[in-house]
Amino acid sequence: MNGYLMKEEKWMPGQETHFESFAMETRYGVVFEDDGEAAYLYGVAKDKEGTDLIILDALHIFEMEEGEQLMQQPRMVQILWSRDWLKCALIIDGYCHALYDFETHGGYNINEFPPPNNFWTKGGRQLSDDLIKSFF
């Protein structure tokens, strides 16, 4: 692995969950949230005072379909940071589902949703094998 494992949590899709991970040497971080209906990974930054968070971007991870709760199994969620603390990946059961590149203002996920915002995100959303390999 080419980076740091900063968070490892069990997650039951469809159950309210919230956890975060912040880079050790930058102001960037990610927040994973499942509100019971949908899960998102937010790219965030601490403000200049370090007291408030600014949401830079949101990446859709999971949507709970009606009746699907009964079939869900616990998942292992990991947050990995690159050695320069400018890239962060969300790994679920050993598979990369989302990646933030804070240096280039990129947010990438499997379903490319939601579309890039006009506030922070530059470029497309496609999480390609080449992009994942460049991180790992």
Image (tube, rainbow, N blue to C red):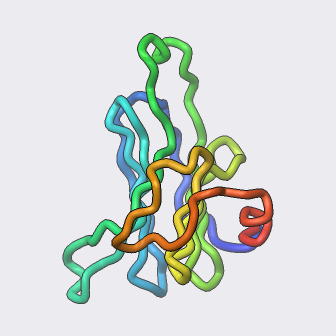
On screen, residue 51 versus residue 14, left or right, reads: left
On screen, residue 52 versus residue 36, left or right, reads: left
Q: Is residue 73 above or below residue 55?
A: above
- For the image, the number of numbered tags is 0
Using the image as rendered, state which of residue 28 and residue 126 is in the foreground: 126
Q: Is residue 8 above or below residue 10?
A: below
On screen, residue 118 versus residue 107, left or right, reads: left
Q: Which quadrant is home to the C terminus?
A: bottom right
Name the image quarter holding residue 20.
Answer: bottom left
Residue at 39% x, 64% y is: 117
Q: Which quadrant is home to the N terminus?
A: bottom right
Residue at 25% x, 88% y is: 48
Q: Position of residue 129 (x, y in %)?
A: 78, 57
Residue at 35% x, 47% y is: 18
Q: Is residue 13 above or below residue 94?
A: above
Name the image quarter holding residue 67.
Answer: top left
Using the image as rendered, state which of residue 45 and residue 4 is in the foreground: 45
Q: Position of residue 86 (x, y in %)?
A: 55, 80
Q: Is residue 101 above or below residue 34?
A: below
Residue at 39% x, 53% y is: 19
Q: Position of residue 28 (x, y in %)?
A: 42, 76
